[in-house]
């Protein structure tokens, strides 16, 4: 897959990230968009054929990714405010393989049994998997070894957002996110999409 991504984005934009033995290989992808981002993406989860339901046929092979903003210093791997992305992308990828289950658009999960905040600055404590939103064009399906490999973004969510999604459904929740300007791009400073907006009353 690395070669296909190099063909899309250029050789200087795609590099391998060294992982420990037994972990899923990762790629670091720098995208020079209007607002540059860096992707942390799995590069091997596609080897596992997910047992998807009939309605999801054609999406058995997936790679996961986090989309990091330009201010994110991912190289500071000892910084707990930054390095949790590596821990969680590995944990999620290993979970789906070990449990012999599947991931798809709209799936949600807590950040561990205690649903703790991801970091001191990233207060969200749930994840949702989604089709690429900000990167819909850039991360279109890759055809590789007779497989259609798709990308699923990992989006951190607040508990109130999870509750809204459970109440209103995935479609309405996605509308809520997008109308609030929220995509898969991580943001240490964002509030919940469900937060009430105060309106001034006319006298």
Image (cartoon, rainbow, N blue to C red):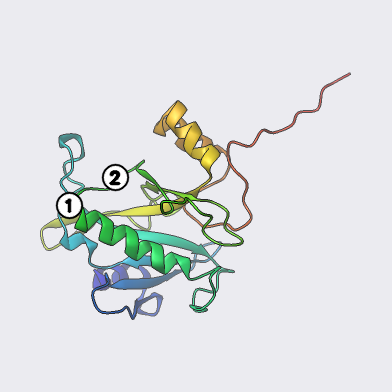
Q: Is residue 126 left or right of residue 149?
A: right
- Residue appearing at x 52%, y 66% in the figure: 36
Report the quarter where the N terminus lies: bottom left
Q: Residue furthest right?
A: 203
Q: Position of residue 116 (x, y in %)?
A: 51, 54
Identify the residue at horizontal 38%, vertical 58% (top origin). 138
* Cα distance in 3D space between marks 1 and 2: 14 Å
- Is 130 placed left or right of 21 in the picture? right
| Local secondary structure at mark 2 | loop
Q: Quadrant of the C terminus?
A: top right
Specify the quadrant of the image occupied by residue 65.
Answer: bottom left
Q: In which quarter of the view is residue 196 placed?
A: top right
Label annotation for residue 100:
1
Q: Is residue 126 above or below residue 34?
A: above
Can residue 39 be seen at all in this image of the molecule?
A: no
Q: Is residue 146 left or right of residue 42?
A: left
Which image quadrant for residue 39? Answer: bottom left
Where residue 70 appears, as percent x and y from the top left, is: 56, 68
Q: Is residue 17 above or below residue 33?
A: below
Q: Secondary structure at mark 1?
A: loop
At horizontal 15% and vertical 36% (from top left) the residue drawn is 54
Query: Would you say residue 96 is visible in this rendering?
Result: yes
Per the rendering, the mark at residue 104 is 2
Q: Which mark is residue 143?
A: none
Q: Is residue 85 above or below residue 55?
A: below
Find residue 142 and report its horizontal and vertical position in percent. Answer: 24, 58
| Circle 1 Cα neighbour tier, 10 Å, few/some/many (<14 / 14–19 / ≥20) | few
* Residue closest to the far front: 114
| Disc 1 to disc 2: CB gap under 8 Å | no
How crowded pointer 2 is (Cα within 10 Å; few <14, some 14-19, many 20+) is rated as some
Taking the spot 17% from the left edge, 52% from the top edge, the residue there is: 100
């Amino acid at each position: 897959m690395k070669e296909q991504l190099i063909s899309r984005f250029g050789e200087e934009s795609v590099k391998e990230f060294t992982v420990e033995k037994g972990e899923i290989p990762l790629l670091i992808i720098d995208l020079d968009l209007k607002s540059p981002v860096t992707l942390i993406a799995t590069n091997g989860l596609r080897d596992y054929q997910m047992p998807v339901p009939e309605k999801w046929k054609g999406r058995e092979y997936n790679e996961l990714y986090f989309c990091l903003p330009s201010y994110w210093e991912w190289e500071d791997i000892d910084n707990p405010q930054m390095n949790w992305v590596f821990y969680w992308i590995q944990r999620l990828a290993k979970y789906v393989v070990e449990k012999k289950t599947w991931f798809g658009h709209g799936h949600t999960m807590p950040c561990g049994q205690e649903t703790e905040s991801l970091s001191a600055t990233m207060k969200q404590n749930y994840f949702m998997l989604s089709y690429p939103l900000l990167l819909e064009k850039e991360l279109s399906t890759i055809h590789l070894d007779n497989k259609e490999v798709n990308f699923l973004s990992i989006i951190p969510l607040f508990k109130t957002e999870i509750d809204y999604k459970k109440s209103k459904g995935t479609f309405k929740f996605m509308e809520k996110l997008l109308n609030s300007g929220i995509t898969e791009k991580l943001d240490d400073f964002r509030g919940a999409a469900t937060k009430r907006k105060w309106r001034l009353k006319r006298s």
